[in-house]
Amino acid sequence: MKKIIFFISLVSFSLTSMAQTPQYPFPHHYQYTAGSILPNNHTAAVLNTNTETFYDQWKAVYLKNDCGTNQYYVWFQENPQPATICVSEGQGYGMVITAYMAGYDANAKTYFDGLYNFYKAHPSVNNANLMAWAQVTGCADDPNGGNDGASDGDMDIAYGLLLAHYQWGSSGAINYLSEAVNIINAIKLDDTNPSIFTTKLGDWANSTDPMYYDTRPSDFMMDHFRAFESASGSTAWNAVTNECYSLIHTMQTNFSSASGLLPDFIVHCNTTPVPASANYLEGPEDGGYSYNACRTPWRIGTDYLVSGDARAKTALDKMNAWIRTKTADTPANIQSGYTLTGATISGDNYESEAFIAPFAVGAMDSSINQTWLNSVYDHLLSMQLSNTTYYENTIKMQTLIVLSSNWWIPAGSTTGVQNNISANTDVVLYPNPADEKLFIKSDKQIKNFVCINYLGQAVNLKSENNTINIASLPKGIYILIFNPENGESLSRKFTKE
């Protein structure tokens, strides 16, 4: 009886510790896809320090808490009339950034929870689980169309909640996992088109809207969709991922065969997809590579780094070859807008981190880009936060996390789950991810164990001869807590495919 009580106490202590301390503290060097690269003109420690330094600068300027008790928002900084103080896109960015920087920043959870509280205080009029797109001075939703949702902000908010669940657990004041699944299901309902599996422009584009079958390639966040599928169990997210890659292929084949660039908007996805015309939604460059599409090398790049999807590498290789030739391998020559054929857009011949930083992530897909990647990274570091605006600086912040190998995903990676909870290495789980059976390799006798699910709950599993039957488990990430013969506790993570 004493042994059983001790084991239960051990599990309870482990779960409490997991809920209170970050499980993936920064720096957490994630194992990216084999063959991918990092900047190698700096040590890993310097890459981490550069990311931390910029994060300190970023949060000092952009994290605001003057809209209510226990609320934070990411300051939009730019001032149209009425003055916009926040957009859902930035709120999603902030939740992702603070979740990744937990461990370095002791206040990361406080910031994250405050960002979550602001999101919950500003629901979209179309779906209460989604966020109203824009808030203005006085902390109210913008009455001029800012009370409905934008897909990109919603997707990053959902992804941030999944990161929070894996960082801190969901047994506290906020059930991060439950909230993540709620918004994931809302995104599927109102931010995607169920008939053709495309991402919509927002929850306002219903079946009677002329833009219902249109999309924005900067919303193609395939690493997010893989995590959404793992958390929600919906295979529709795999179909969305496939459709995104299909549209990327179509654009690169038919409209940007030389440059590989993607347009800000794609229309008629239900029939014959084509780039949008000028002034379709935001301005004269809506059919070109402008301030929406500039994010696509980063979005495609992160998916390649964590999943190894060959379709991502094919797309990135085209972009990389073109931009290196276009700039003569000189990052300072990257301009802020191009046509799909690769011509610089008139008036856009200036520098912006929003264009430079994503090309750095895109370059990580192959060692042939090593010198180029090093140069782009150094040039990006030379650009000062005070000289640009929220958009540029916040994109730069996220790409620095990627460039320092700290962009881990909360589920669904084909590169597997790193077993870094314990420093011990005498227990190995394989294969990982696994489908029906999980094997234990150990130099110690494993007498008993407990398996912990998403919610921190123990689940019953049967084992025999160091083989665990996991066929009955839902897809997701789990923790096995072992009690080997010498009485020490060991923890290991595994993914159920």
Image (spheres, grey):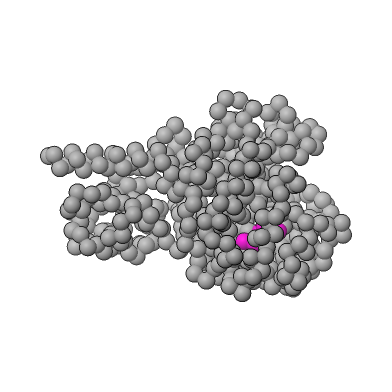
Residue lying furthest left: 1
Residue 278 or 63: which is nearer the viewer? 63
Relative placement, left or right, of 229 versus 494 is right
Q: Residue 384: image x %, image y %?
A: 71, 49
Identify which residue is drawn at 55% across, 43% down: 98
Q: Residue 335: image x %, image y %?
A: 78, 60
State whether residue 374 appears in this view.
yes
Q: Residue 124: image x %, image y %?
A: 63, 36
Residue lying furthest right: 346
**From the viewer's perspective, is residue 62 above or below residue 419?**
above
Asked if residue 267 lies in the magenta stretch, the reply is no
**From the viewer's perspective, is residue 37 above or below residue 199?**
below
State whether residue 214 appears in this view.
no
Relative placement, left or right, of 274 versus 241 is right
Q: Report the number of discs.
A: 0
Identify which residue is drawn at 19% across, 40% down: 6
Identify which residue is drawn at 49% across, 49% down: 26
Identify which residue is drawn at 47% across, 40% down: 176
Residue 399 or 371: which is nearer the viewer? 371
Q: Residue 354: image x %, image y %?
A: 71, 54
Magenta stretch, main secondary structure, is helix
Query: Dividing the image into 4 quarters, which one contains the C terminus?
Result: bottom left
Asked if residue 357 lies in the magenta stretch, the reply is yes
Residue 368 or 430: which is nearer the viewer? 368
Residue 44 or 71: which is nearer the viewer? 44
Query: Dividing the image into 4 quarters, which one contains the N terminus?
Result: top left
Q: Which residues are magenta?
A: 356-361
Relative placement, left or right, of 421 versus 326 is left
